[in-house]
Amino acid sequence: MKRAARTIGAAGALRGSARAEYAYEAIRLELLEGALAPGDKLSVIDLAAQLQCSRVPIMEALKRLEREELVTIVPQVGCRVVTPGIADVADFFVLFAAVEAAVTALAAERRDADDIVRFRALCRDIDAALASAGGPAAHDPSYRRLNLRFHGEIHAMARSPLASKMAAALWDRSDFYIKMVFGSLYFSRRVIRSHRDIRRAVINGDPVAADAAVRSHLQRVGNAVTEQMAASTSTGPRGADPAEHEPDAPT
């Protein structure tokens, strides 16, 4: 947890529920962008020391992460990062594709002229940021953050808080699975093409094309992740290079 603690700082100055929220965000960030990997043990004592807080907010944070199925808590034994099975991951991406595609189709149907102006500007900003982002071996967290901005704007255009809440709840798990096998998200050429298809469909107001673009994209995501999981199971972990497999980033 050292990287997360350095990035976010200590929780010592906070009080009450704010400490639990702070601890949650710190551990969550390490799961999604840091060094924590499936099967790693999470020590409540060590986390409390690193985040400079008591054990209570740490336990509250871990229980919340357990509900999100990112960690597993065994009473009287301890807490570990989850080690998901291939079938569960495959099923997850089927569900994720369906929900995210529905939200994106709503965005294509409901966006207005002002939305399009904002979306075009955001896409230009993202393209500019990608030009200076690190290569696949750098495991640059900016890819994940740019991806969230892109799809966050699409969710805003959908104007469906319930649907957006359902889909956004799946983002972290998708990011975790991709990091689990490839080290981080990376915008490969295939990802960039997929995002352009999604952009075009939303801007053109074509919900059918938007739905299809997202479903196709996420099917490739799920296939890339589960194929690498299967390869690692049969040959042992080998530190997969995301550039070699060109995995799609989650949407």
Image: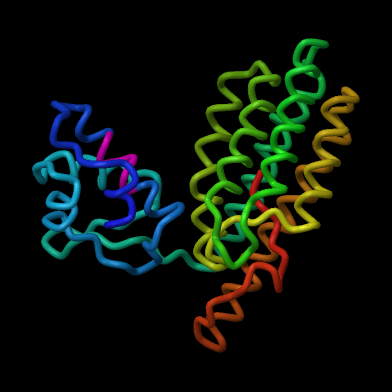
Image quarter where the C terminus lies is: top right
* Quadrant where the image shows the N terminus: bottom left
Colour scheme in the image? rainbow
The image shows residue 95 at horizontal and vertical percentages of 62, 46
Number of marks in the rendered image:
0
- Above/below status of 251 relative to 159: below
- 128 with respect to 194 (left or right): left
Q: Position of residue 77 (x, y in %)?
A: 15, 65
**Does 154 appear in magenta?**
no
User: Is the magenta region chiefly helix, strand or loop?
Assistant: helix
Which corner quadrant of the image does residue 104 belong to?
A: top right
Q: Which residues are magenta?
A: 22-27
From this view, report whether residue 148 is shown above or below residue 85: above
* Of residues 30 and 230, the one drawn nearer to the viewer in this rendering: 30
Left or right: 14 in relation to 192: left
Report the residue at 40% width, 65% height from top: 37
Which residue is depicted at the point 37% across and 53% down? 30
Quadrant in the picture for residue 245: bottom right
- Residue nearer the viewer, 171 or 6: 6
